[in-house]
Every structure is written in structure tokens, then in C-alpha cells.
Image: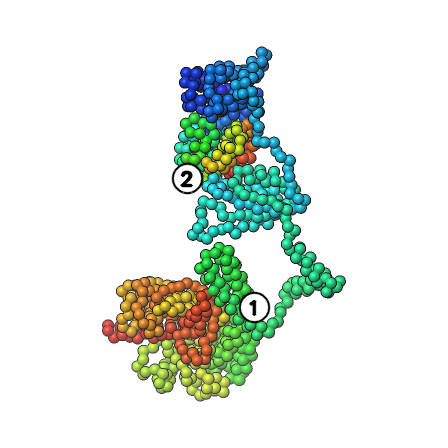
């Protein structure tokens, strides 16, 4: 390749020499012409540069002095007088000989250089000084060192790439590279073309400043290399050892190792730690408080626009989230702990009633918050009793309807999003809707001509004072009706549904939130007040169509993709004064199978809702299931979705009836 | 995809030498004969790096870089200036014009490849 290059170079020199000669001759006629001076300089420069590139060092050295003269002419130090031009032309004539490597027997070249130097005022023209001799490599200290660097000014716009620098530093053995964000300005003051991030890292022993200069050669960067402070951790450890040493004597060094080892063994064996439940409750309370304070901190950090504070707040948020999840996980108890009790109950009942029952459980390992599990026991026992007592036929009845003699009761628990679905189904006689209806009418719960769907009819079972058992049995009829079940499930922010087919059996479905302590909430605003809706029940958010902006009539519907969904206006429900803004939102919430829209002024956002129970004074306040403290310290009420959905459904049914009548 | 380099030099021999060296190493090389030509080519398509001589007719290296940096598509392209001078003055001027680095002639093919690798990654 270099041979080819030599040929190209020779041709190039021929062209340049022609240009040079023409330039020098023209310069004789027009000595002050800067354009010509520049052209001559450039030609010389190119011959020198290319010559040096292709190994014509003698040529390059010769032209260097020639070029220096023209550089001084260019800068006005010298005038391009006749003497200079004569020497220059003579020098030019030497160039082909230098290119061909011909000797200089008469010392022509030396004479020309001598002449040039004389013109330059006798001062010696230094040979090309090169890039400066490499300094002796200087290593910083004996041990590892710390390097810090940051790109300066317009380095990024100039094409400097910090990742390449970091790669090169890694090549030198850099470890523990951390970004230094201390000079990161707030977003609104961020210069996108500047690099505000610095980097700090450990460099191994023996790295020299010369090596680093090489790395930073092409990068406009501030950097410094200093001996590493002995790593902080070992220092701290030895300080602790020194402090505890005298106090605990010779046993001290062994103690930490001894303490750590059993813990590790316990982990390997999968040992479980038993902790009193109240400690977990206390922990959960503290975590709840922490989540509230964290929200407050995040809010303050956001307002301050201080990046360091914001970064810290973000870390706290992450840590608090992790702590919250860990604590909640600790409180999770598998359904299995309940199921044992149920098995015994089913066995006892079926013996007593002479109704053989096969009890199967699916999802024993499904976990629920300890509190939920505790509160769930009684309602489930109640439902189970009802199922065996009322739902299950005797073996003779079953044989007559071609069912197996042995009845089947299935309990299943599965996770569904942030909820747990608990289903208790039997293959018994089912619930007789007509019977339930008659009873409800007799008890005055519904009007004789009320139009109810099956689901609505079955829901009557949960109304206070309702009991379908014709004779009060020793087992299920203890004056405690299914209404207690419903109330307990409500208090757990769950819902309950019954589905039954005559002759085929009944399924009771409980939907329960995974946890009671902290939920993901959707913060909304109505008439300047903030409320929280449990995110788990929020299906979607739509805009209230402008034509519905003003309330009309009792029941209102929204067309959500072809399905009519009744909606409630919180402003109206809460009797708020004033007018809503132009754009209202509708939050579609679901409880059980029912969807209802809730009209709000504004969606604020999501938040971690730490649930605070309402006082007993507020026990009768429906529509609100608790309260939470927001980041700014204010209180937001938590809306009871199950109740709102119930109201929405009631108003929706009223509306549907009205429409039927109108039709 | 191979990285692309634009080499701007009025000296055909240097230009060829750079082009051949880089092409052998797998780079796609475009040649320009002076600053003006370089600017036209640099703005017509993106390059991963530009190597430019300083002393050139029509438009010299530093003017080329200054003009290049005026254009949005000309920002952030690493430019290496070739020069036979090694004075701090030129380095400083080159920096101010927006050059990332410089390379002193004469250089070896290995040096050229090392510099390009340093700049392009």
C-alpha cells in the first residue's frame, strides 16, 4: 500500500511544485499579496505534511524551515523581499531531488537553509518540536487511586462521548464507577448540549497520569486523580472493632461471625420465624405512617425543585415501597389456616344431618392479609353451614333426582388482580327465588309488585332479618342472619354475590381486597375536596359528554361502548354548592358484576392510600369507608365503592323502569 | 453497519492513505478535497467522525468546523484536525472552533486507527 502511496505522493508533489513556482514568481510581481503568500505557505505545508507521512523525513525537515519563513511573512514579521524569493525558488528546485532521495554533493541545501536562517535574523529555527517529549509516567501513590472527571462546556456538541471515555477507563481497570449528579441542574435549567454529569471511580494501583492524559486527549474534560482514601467500609469496621474490643474482650472478633452463621443456617433450612401478631400490626402502622410522610416529602421535594432533594425523596419512595411490600408480605397468611377448621365443621355437620358431603378445597395456598383471614372465618362458616343445612339435600332426595348420594361442596380461593375471589359452591337444591321473594314480601322488604332479577332476589337473603329456613335449626338459625355475613364482608371492603340454579346448586362468591392497610388509590376532586377511590375497583375514566354536564332527572346513563352504565354525580350526592368546571370526568368503578360511573370534577392522580378507620361517630356514614392522609397533610375520605355501586344500580334500575313505562 | 468517516484533505496522497487505512479496518470512507467540499458532504449525510486537514484552499479546517457547528446536523459529530503544527495555539483554536481532537502529521496507520477508534468507539 505504501508503494502506491509513494507514487501518488510524487504526483502530488509535482502538482504542488508547479503551483509553488507560479506563486513565488507572482509574488515577485506583487510582494504584498496575502492570497499568494497564503497559497505558497499552504503548498509548502502540504508537501511537508505529506512528505513526513510517507517517510520523506529529510524533505519534511528541509521544507519545515522554508515554511517557517513563509509563516513569518504571513504574520507580517517579514516582507517577501527579492532575497527571500530567490532563496525560496532555489529551495523549491531542491525538492524533487529530496523526493527522489538524491544526495546533495555540493551542499546546496545546507547553503539555502543557511541563507534562510540569516534572513530570519540568525536565530536558529527549531526543528519540529513534535508533540513534546513524553514525560516520565507518573503513578499516583502506591495503592489504588480515585479518579473524577467531568466533560466541560461544549464537549458533547464537539462529539465527545463519555461512554467511550468510560470504556477506555474500564480498559485501564476502573471499577466502582459512579455518576456524580451533584451539579445536575433542575430540569428547567438543563442545557441539553452540556454534560452535567460527572463520574468518579476507583483506578487500580499503577495507573499513571500519562495514561489518563492519553484517555482524555480528545475530550474537553476536567479530571483529577488522587490517592484513594482507604476504603470507607474497612475503616469503619476496624473502628468498631477497636471500640468494642476492650469492652467485650477476646470474644469480640468472633461474635459477629457467630451471630451471622446461625441466621444463614436458618435460611438454608427454610426455618420460619414466629412473631407475635401485634408486632406485625405495629410494624404495619409504622409503615403506614412512613408512606404518608414519604408522600409529604415527595411533594415538598417537587415544590423545592432541588434535584438532590428530589433524588433523595425518590430513593425514600422506593425504599418505603419496598418496606411496605415486605411488611404486607409478612402479614400474608395462606387460606390453609382456615381450611382445617372448615373440614372439621363439614364433617361434624354432615354426620349430624345425615348428609354425606365431599368437601374439596382449591387454592389452600392462596394468601390473604392476616386481618382479612381472621374476619373471614365467621362469614365463611356461616355460608358453609347454610349450604349444608339448607342447600344440601338428603341422600334420598339426591338419589331421586339422579344426583350422586354424596353431595359436593367446593371452596376455592384464587387471586384476581388486587383481589381474592373466594367461591363456595355446592351441588345442592339451589335457592328457590320465588320462595325468597315471597318471604321478602311477607317481611315487608320489598313491595309485592317489585320487579327483581334473580340476582337481586338472591341479594335479599343478605337483608337484615331475612331467613329462609322454614324451621329454625339448631345449626344455622341462631338469630344471626346472612346480613351479618354481608356486613363483615363490607367492612373488609369486599363484596358478596349469590348465583343459584334450582336443582343444580348455589355458588356464593366473595371478593376481597388483598390487604386492608394500604391500597393503591385514585385521588379525585369534587368541589375543592379530595377523595380517594380504591384503584382496584376503578375500571376506566372517561370524560363526561358536554350534553350531560347538567344533571337531569333521577337516573342518568352513559353509553360506554354500547353498554348503558348508570352514573352518580358526587356533587349532587354530597350536596355541594357551586358549579362544576367545564370538563368533568367519570370514573367507572366496578363492584361484583356491576359497573357504575362516578362524576368528579377532576382526577388528581394515584397515591398510596394508607387507610385510617373512621371513628365510631361516623360508623353510620355510608359512601365513605375510611380516610387517608395525603402528601400535603390534608385528609381525603375514601369512598365506599360497594355502596356507591349499590346506589348507582338502584338509580339505574329506577331509570330502566321509567324507560320501560315510557315505552 | 460499518461506521462512516469523512476525510477532508487537499492532499490526495494523505486522503488516499487515510481512506485506504480506514477502509481496510472496515470503515466506510468519504473523501472531500477542501473545507467547502467537506461542508457540503458533511451536511448531506451523517458521519460517525470527520478527519480534516487544517491548511486547505477555499476553506481551511477550522473554518470548516465552525461552519459545520452552525448546523444542527453538524453538532455532535466528532472532528479530528490533522496538522503538522503542534503548538498549543492551534489546539486551542481547534477546540474553540469545535474540534474534538487533533493528530500531528506524520502519523502511522496504527495511530490513525487508534485515534478513530477513540473517537468513534
Q: Write the residue at 37% across / 84% down.
A: A439
Q: Write the residue at 56% across / 26% down.
A: A128
Q: Chain of mark 1?
A: A
Instruction: Specify whether A475 is left or right of A142.
Output: left
| Image quadrant where residue A495 sits | bottom left
Q: Which mark is residue A85?
A: none
Q: Write the residue at 34% across / 64% down.
A: A585
Instruction: Tell which of B36 and B1 is nearer to you.
Output: B36
The residue to which callout 1 is attached is: A330
Q: Is residue A466 above or below residue B12?
A: below
Q: Secondary structure at mark 1?
A: helix
Instruction: Tell which of A114 and A582 is nearer to you.
Output: A114
Q: Write the residue at 54% across / 18% down.
A: A118
Instruction: Tell which of A361 and A373 is nearer to you.
Output: A373
**Label 2 Cα neighbours within 10 Å, binned few <14 / some 14-19 / many ≥20:** some
Instruction: Specify whether A439 is left or right of A40.
Output: left
Residue at the farthest front position: A121
Q: Secondary structure at mark 2?
A: helix
Instruction: Specify whether A249 is left or right of A625.
Output: right
Spatial separation of the CA atoms under disc 2 and disc 1:
56 Å
Location of residue A564 in the rendering, given as x and y in whole percent from the top left corner: 32, 67
Q: Is residue A451 visible?
A: yes
Q: Which mark is residue B73?
A: 2
Colouring scheme applied when the structure was drawn: rainbow
Location of residue A54 in the rendering, given as x and y in whole percent from the top left corner: 54, 24
Location of residue A61 in the rendering, given as x and y in whole percent from the top left corner: 56, 22
Amino acid at each position: 500500500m505504501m508503494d502506491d502511496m509513494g507514487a501518488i505522493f510524487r504526483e502530488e508533489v509535482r502538482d504542488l511544485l508547479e503551483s509553488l513556482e507560479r506563486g513565488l514568481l507572482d509574488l515577485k510581481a506583487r510582494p504584498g499579496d496575502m492570497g499568494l503568500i497564503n497559497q505558497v505557505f499552504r503548498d509548502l505545508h502540504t508537501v511537508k505534511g505529506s512528505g513526513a507521512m510517507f517517510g520523506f523525513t529529510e524533505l519534511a525537515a528541509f521544507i519545515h524551515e522554508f515554511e517557517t519563513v513563509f509563516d513569518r511573512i504571513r504574520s507580517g514579521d517579514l516582507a517577501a523581499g527579492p532575497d527571500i524569493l530567490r532563496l525560496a525558488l532555489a529551495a523549491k528546485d531542491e525538492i524533487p531531488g529530496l523526493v527522489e532521495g538524491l544526495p546533495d554533493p555540493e551542499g546546496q541545501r545546507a547553503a539555502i537553509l543557511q541563507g534562510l536562517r540569516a534572513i530570519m535574523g540568525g536565530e536558529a529555527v527549531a526543528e519540529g518540536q513534535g508533540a513534546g517529549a513524553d514525560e516520565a509516567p507518573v503513578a499516583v501513590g502506591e495503592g489504588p487511586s480515585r479518579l473524577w472527571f467531568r466533560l466541560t462546556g461544549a464537549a458533547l456538541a464537539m462529539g465527545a462521548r463519555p461512554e467511550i471515555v468510560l470504556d477506555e477507563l474500564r480498559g485501564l481497570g476502573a471499577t466502582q464507577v459512579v455518576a456524580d449528579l451533584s451539579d445536575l441542574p433542575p430540569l428547567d435549567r438543563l442545557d441539553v448540549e452540556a454534560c452535567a454529569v460527572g463520574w468518579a471511580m476507583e483506578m487500580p494501583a499503577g495507573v499513571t497520569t500519562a495514561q489518563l492524559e492519553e484517555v482524555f486527549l480528545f475530550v474537553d474534560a476536567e479530571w483529577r486523580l488522587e490517592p484513594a482514601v482507604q476504603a470507607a467500609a474497612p475503616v469503619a469496621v476496624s473502628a468498631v472493632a477497636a471500640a468494642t474490643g476492650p469492652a467485650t474482650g477476646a470474644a469480640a472478633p468472633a461474635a459477629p461471625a457467630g451471630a451471622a452463621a446461625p441466621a444463614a443456617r436458618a435460611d438454608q433450612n427454610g426455618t420460619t420465624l414466629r412473631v407475635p401478631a401485634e408486632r406485625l400490626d405495629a410494624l404495619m402502622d409504622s409503615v403506614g405512617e412512613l408512606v404518608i410522610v414519604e408522600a409529604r416529602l415527595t411533594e415538598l421535594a417537587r415544590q423545592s425543585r432541588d434535584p438532590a432533594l428530589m433524588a433523595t425523596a425518590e430513593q425514600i419512595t422506593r425504599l418505603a415501597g419496598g418496606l411496605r411490600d415486605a411488611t404486607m408480605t409478612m402479614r400474608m397468611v395462606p387460606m390453609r389456616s382456615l381450611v382445617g377448621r372448615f373440614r372439621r365443621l363439614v364433617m361434624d355437620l354432615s354426620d349430624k344431618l345425615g348428609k354425606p358431603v365431599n368437601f374439596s378445597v382449591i387454592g389452600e395456598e392462596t394468601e390473604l392479609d392476616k386481618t382479612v383471614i381472621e374476619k373471614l372465618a365467621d362469614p365463611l362458616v356461616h355460608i358453609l353451614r347454610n349450604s349444608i343445612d339448607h342447600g344440601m339435600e338428603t341422600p334420598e332426595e339426591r338419589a331421586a333426582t339422579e344426583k350422586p348420594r354424596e353431595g359436593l361442596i367446593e371452596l376455592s380461593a384464587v387471586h384476581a388482580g388486587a383481589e381474592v375471589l373466594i367461591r363456595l359452591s355446592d351441588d345442592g337444591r339451589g335457592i328457590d327465588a320465588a320462595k325468597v321473594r315471597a318471604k321478602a314480601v311477607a317481611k315487608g322488604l320489598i313491595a309485592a309488585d317489585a320487579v327483581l332479577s334473580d340476582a337481586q332476589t338472591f341479594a335479599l337473603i343478605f337483608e337484615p332479618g331475612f331467613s329462609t329456613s322454614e324451621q329454625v335449626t339448631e345449626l344455622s338459625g341462631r338469630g344471626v342472619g346472612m346480613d351479618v355475613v354481608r356486613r363483615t364482608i363490607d367492612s373488609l371492603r369486599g363484596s358478596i354475590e349469590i348465583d343459584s340454579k334450582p336443582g343444580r346448586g348455589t355458588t356464593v362468591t366473595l371478593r376481597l381486597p388483598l390487604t386492608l392497610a394500604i391500597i393503591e388509590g385514585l385521588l379525585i376532586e369534587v368541589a375543592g375536596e379530595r377523595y380517594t377511590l380504591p384503584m382496584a375497583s376503578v375500571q376506566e375514566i372517561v370524560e363526561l359528554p358536554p350534553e350531560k354536564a347538567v344533571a337531569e332527572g333521577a337516573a342518568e346513563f352513559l353509553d360506554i361502548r354500547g353498554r348503558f352504565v348508570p352514573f352518580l354525580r358526587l356533587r349532587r350526592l354530597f350536596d355541594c354548592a357551586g358549579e362544576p368546571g367545564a370538563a368533568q370526568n367519570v370514573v367507572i368503578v366496578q363492584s361484583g358484576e356491576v359497573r357504575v360511573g362516578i362524576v368528579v370534577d377532576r382526577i388528581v392522580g394515584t397515591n398510596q392510600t394508607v387507610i385510617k378507620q373512621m371513628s365510631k361517630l361516623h360508623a353510620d356514614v355510608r359512601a365513605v369507608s375510611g380516610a387517608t392522609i395525603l402528601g400535603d397533610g390534608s385528609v381525603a375520605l375514601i369512598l365506599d365503592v360497594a355502596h356507591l355501586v349499590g346506589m348507582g344500580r338502584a338509580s339505574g334500575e329506577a331509570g330502566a323502569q321509567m324507560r320501560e313505562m315510557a315505552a | 453497519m460499518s461506521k462512516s468517516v469523512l476525510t477532508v484533505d487537499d492532499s490526495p496522497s494523505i486522503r488516499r492513505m487515510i481512506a485506504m487505512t480506514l477502509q481496510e479496518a472496515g470503515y466506510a470512507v468519504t473523501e472531500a478535497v477542501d473545507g467547502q467540499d467537506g461542508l457540503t458532504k458533511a451536511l448531506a449525510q451523517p458521519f460517525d467522525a470527520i478527519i480534516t486537514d487544517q491548511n486547505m484552499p477555499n476553506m481551511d479546517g477550522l473554518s470548516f468546523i465552525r461552519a459545520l457547528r452552525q448546523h444542527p446536523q453538524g453538532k455532535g459529530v466528532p472532528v479530528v484536525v490533522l496538522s503538522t503544527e503542534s503548538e498549543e495555539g492551534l489546539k486551542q483554536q481547534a477546540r474553540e472552533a469545535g474540534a474534538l481532537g487533533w493528530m500531528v502529521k506524520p502519523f502511522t496507520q496504527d495511530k490513525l486507527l487508534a485515534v478513530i477508534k477513540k473517537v468513534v468507539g
